[in-house]
Image (cartoon, helix red, strand yellow):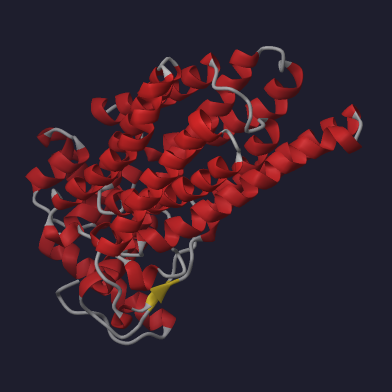
Amino acid sequence: MASRARRIVPLWSNRTASAATAVSLVGGSALIVLDCFVLSTGAVKLVGLAFAGGGLGSLILMWAEFYGSLNPMRVALYHALAIMVGCVIKWVFMGMSAPYLAFFAIVLPLVSLVQVRLSMKRLPERDLPRKYDKAEGGAAFPWKPVLLMSACTFACGFGALPMQPLGFGNTIGVLLVTSLVLFGVLSESRWFNFDTIYQLAFPLSIIAFLFVAPSVSANAVVMTACYDAGYTMLSMFMMLVLSNITYRFGISAVWINGIERGIRYLVEIAGWALSATLPLVASSSVISGIYTAIALVMIVVFVVVLFTERGLSAKWGVSLHDGGGIDGAMSSSRLAMRVSDVSAKHDLTPREEEVLQLLARRESPSQIEKNLYVAHGTLKAHISHIYRKLGIHSREELFELLEGEDSRRRERDGDSPAIGSNG
């Protein structure tokens, strides 16, 4: 789907894609139910899993389009709530009798498909994903967040086999980190910003992998809580990064998330396979050494990316290729790139850059307050700090500054003259 993104986006409004997703989800679930309770062949179940998995992949990319149309504050809030509710639903399902389980396994995917379409229709027209236009050019793939996610996913796959049952520790880990994010977003706490998720995800994963798994493996609650806390935190940050790249630069959510998800599942399978085969061919000391080596690789990746990309507001390896157009998504992309350059140059905080992005998009103060869940006084303080750091006194001066920064960047890169006032 990532390879065909230019032809099928926007995915959520593509009737053929929606119909195929519904058929795959419902048909796959029906085949699984049929094999589990009637046929018991195993083969039909595998076919059902493949169909349901394909439909789920398409559904995930539709939701990625939705998240890519929101500012990061709303992404953090909605995604944390979704994970929290999903965790509760899993536990409810574990206590259901077979007929109820079969019914909801078929119905709930359709509910999610309807919900993503209704959610997209509630967004302003200007925020909806657009069809690909050759005049808009393209972008280099942001490989740095994918490298981050791949390293941790491989390690988690290696440390926890897929047949491990859902335990109490899993739920504790997930609920702790999602509650932390919800509290941080809604409370306007000064200690919380999106980089808090980034800074906690890797230490949690590394500690769980390097110390907890080998030495406290008998304590399944502690081990699974650390694993799921770190991995959930990293997954949330990954959704924030990729959604924010789509939101700022207009890059297709189907393209960027399709590639990232595909790589993530491949390395997860590789981790599972290595974990399953090592005990058959290696001694416990060798396995322990591999544990340490994987943990060291995780630490190196974390340190390298941490010192090259300073959190959510970084470019994460994104660079735009000009296709000649000056309107629509590409002008917005250049505007976001200019804001990133200005923020880095003037040492703006992540929250200040988020406010600056919205100011540059000509959002009104009331709209910014609503989008970022901040009080009027808090927003005024942020704007005052931004203006002081940039040495300006009004929005008009801000737009002039951004236009000037764009001219300098394009001259440095050898591009054509700066875009007009529509940027």
* Left-right relation of 248 to 420: right
Quadrant that contains the N terminus: bottom left
Whole-percent x, y for residue 203 in the image = 58, 31
Note whether residue 300 is visible. no
**Residue beneath the point at 14% across and 40% down:** 369
Residue nearest the observer in this picture, 316 or 376: 316
Residue drawn at point x = 18 percent, y = 43 percent: 371
Q: Nearer the viewer, residue 25 or 170?
A: 25
**Residue 294 appears in the rendering:** yes
Look at 49% across and 45% down and name the residue there.
Answer: 48
Q: Nearer the viewer, residue 281 or 327?
A: 281
Horizontal and vertical percent for residue 336? 30, 62
Give the percent coordinates (x, y) of residue 40.
57, 33
Q: Nearer the viewer, residue 178 or 279?
A: 279
Q: Is residue 50 above or below residue 299?
A: below
Relative to 55, is 335 above or below? below
Q: Quadrant of the C terminus?
A: bottom left
Q: Position of residue 194 (x, y in %)?
A: 38, 39
Q: In the picture provided, is 231 more to the left or to the right than 403?
A: right
The mark total stands at 0
Q: Residue furthest front?
A: 39
For residue 414, which quarter of the picture?
bottom left
Q: Is residue 260 left or right of residue 365?
A: right
